[in-house]
Amino acid sequence: MTKFSNYVGRFAPSPTGDLHFGSLVTAVASYLRARSQNGKWLLRIEDIDQKRNQKGSIYSILKTLEMHGLEWDDEIIYQSQRSEIYRFYLNYLNEKKLIYKCSCSRKKLINYYKNLQTMEYIYPGVCRNKEIENKDFSTRIKAFNTFNIKFTDNIQGSIEQNLEKEVGDFVLWRNENIASYQLAVVVDDEIQGITEIVRGSDLLFQTTRQIYLQKCLNFKTLNYAHIPILLNKENQKLSKQTKAEPLKNLNAKENICKILNYIGFEEFIINYLNKNSKNSIELINNSVPYFDLSKINKVISVQFE
Ligand code: GLU
């Protein structure tokens, strides 16, 4: 039986379509990081928003991971089955008087300032002291400006944000009666015992919210490493919306070599690994000792060739 260290990493895709090259870069980087620390690598399917889920994409994501030799540990967690757990923590925050009901519609939000880094509206707490009779409401957490939230990202360096000024009170429970991404991700990372999150830098400025929530819930704060996201020729993030091509599983070895190049492996090492690995499973696992987080480009995004 494998003896793991205390390191626990994870990959948490939303099943909104097939994996594309950008999402596989995140999977490979988090896998190699976890294995190079002798840690576990867990898989969580973030399928809470049923309207965005695409039929067949869970199967396709798992297949792509398997074909690229990315073997996860323990059972897969599905967020769609965990509403009661998220509700429990929401109630805890309610007892601490940290949350409130908000009946502001999306349309109303456009009256507020926008944070140009995240392109999100900064909600100034309009409903904080209102009695909400309306049945259609979301639940927000009060983001008090008592301190700036700071953390040191293991790739991007020092990050600091003032939640009240730069984010505002954010949603924990959506008006469709489901937990928000922020609440679900923080609760699951704690329950799964994650020690470090390696993910795309499009989520870098969501992290301060997650650290604030961890503090409100008395959870421990995790380590973070945000890898550069890949942009297409029009400078858009590779995604299904920007018509990123789905991956070809039959080219798994070739895909991995290309990814190793993006995450800082030198060319002669990639050639050596490729030559000495019979298949993708061997290739990914032979790469583990050569993985070095400090070699990853310390930028927010890179152009995809
Ligand atoms: N489910 C998110 C996504 O697919 C990732 C969330 C996370 O890594 O925290 O973009």
Image (cartoon, rainbow, N blue to C red):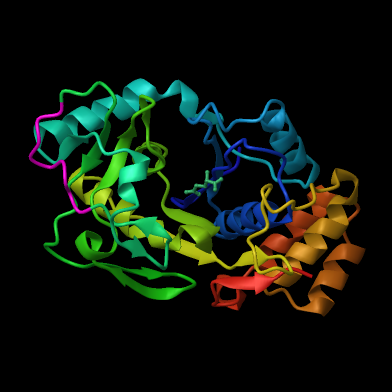
Residue depicted at 63% across the width and 37% down the height: 16
Q: Tell me the quadrant of the picture where the C terminus can be found.
A: bottom right
Name the spot of residue 96 as percent of width and height, x first.
Answer: 9, 37
Which residue is drawn at the image coordinates 89% and 51% (left, top)? 251
- Residue 6 in the figure: left or right of residue 297: left
- Judging depth in this view, the residue of 279 and 144 nearest the camera is 144
Q: Main secondary structure of the magenta part?
A: loop
57 left or right of 44? right
Q: Is residue 207 above or below residue 267?
A: above
Q: Is residue 23 magenta?
A: no
Between 56 and 256, the one lying in front of the other is 56
Expressed as whole percent of the image width and height from the top left, the position of residue 222 reads 36, 55
Work out which quarter of the rendered image holds the N terminus and state it. Answer: top right
Give x and y (percent) for residue 270: 81, 70
Image quadrant in which you'd find residue 284: bottom right
- 5 on left or right of 173: right
Eyeballing the image, is 139 above or below 234? above
125 within the magenta span: yes
| Residue under the image location 92 percent in, 65 percent down | 275
Give, as a single range, the part of the protein colored magenta. 124-132
- The image quarter in which residue 268 lies: bottom right
Identified at 19% across, 28% down, the residue is 91
x and y percentages locating residue 104 in the rendered image = 26, 39
Number of residue marks: 0
